[in-house]
Amino acid sequence: MKNIVILTGAGISAESGLRTFRDSDGLWEGYNIEDVATPEAWEHNPVMVQQFYNERRKSVLEAKPNAAHYALAALEEKYKVTIVTQNIDDLHERAGSTNVVHLHGIITRSQSSIKPELTYPIDGWEIKMGEKCELGSQLRAHVVWFGEAVPMIETAAAICAGADLFILVGSSLAVYPAAGLIGYVDRGVPKYIIDPNIPSVNVRGNVIKIQEKATIGVPALVNELLKD
C-alpha cells in the first residue's frame, strides 16, 4: 500500500474561519506574537495568555472541517496516510483522519507548565487559573510556543523520509523547523504543493504545483489519486 504523507499549514484551517498569526497585519487576533506565544509572555502575564488560548480554543470548537479536511480523510480508503500538521486545531481528526501528528501541539488539550509531556483532555473550552497538573503546576494550553522545543520534529522527519508521495497544503514554509521537513522527502518522490501562493522550495526532483486554495486543490488531487 502506497504511503502518502501530507504536511498541512495554516492555509487549510483559514478556510474554516480560523485566523493565523501569519495574516497580513502581522498580528494574531489583534495580539503581537511575543505577547501571547512565548514562555516569557506566560511568565509576565499568565492570566492574559491563558485567556487568549481559551478564546482561540472556543473558536476552534465552533469551527468545522472543510472540503480539504474531508478529502484528505478520504485518502485512507486506498492509501496509508499520515498527516503532519503545523496547526493546533483538531479539524483533521473531526473530518475523519486517523493518523495525525501535531508538530505544535493541539489546543484542545492542556499541559503542565513545568513538564510539557504531561497532557490532559479539557472539559469544555476553558482552562481556569488554579487548575493544576498532578505535579502541582498551573495547566496551560498544549501548544508549542516560540522559543520552545518541537518534540515531534524528529518523528515527523522520519515519517517524511518514508513517503511514497508527499503533499504540502496551505503552508508558507516560513516557520522552522517544520519548514525543513520537505527536505527529508526522497528526491524521486512526487511532491505536490497546493496553495494560492506557492512557496519557494529548495528541493530537487518531482515537484508538482497546484496554485489553488485548499478547498479546491485538495479535493481535485484526491479525486485523481483515488482513481489510480
Image: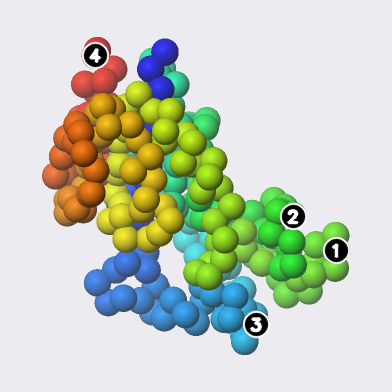
In the displayed structure, would residue 89 be above or below residue 99?
below
Dot 4 crowding, Cα within 10 Å, few <14, some 14–19, many 20+: few
Dot 3 crowding, Cα within 10 Å, few <14, some 14–19, many 20+: few
Q: Residue furthest right?
A: 135
Q: In the image, which disc is placed on residue 118?
A: 2
- Is residue 200 rendered to the left or right of residue 167? left
Q: Quadrant of residue 10?
A: bottom left
Q: Quadrant of the N terminus?
A: top left
Are the two marked residues, 1 and 2, in contact with CB atoms closer than 8 angstroms?
yes
Residue type marked 3: Glu
Q: Residue at x 24, y 12 (%)?
A: 228
Residue 19 seen in this snapshot: no
Q: Quadrant of residue 208?
A: top left
Alpha-carbon span between mark 3 and mark 2: 19 Å
Q: Dot 1 corresponds to which residue?
A: 135
Q: Residue at x 35, y 35 (%)?
A: 185
Q: In the image, which disc is placed on residue 43?
A: 3
In the image, 150 versus 98, the foreground residue is 150
Dot 3 or dot 2: first in sequence order is 3
Residue type marked 1: Leu
Dot 1 or dot 2: first in sequence order is 2
Q: Residue furthest bottom?
A: 44
x, y percent for residue 85? 44, 46
Q: Dot 4 corresponds to which residue?
A: 227
Dot 2 crowding, Cα within 10 Å, few <14, some 14–19, many 20+: some
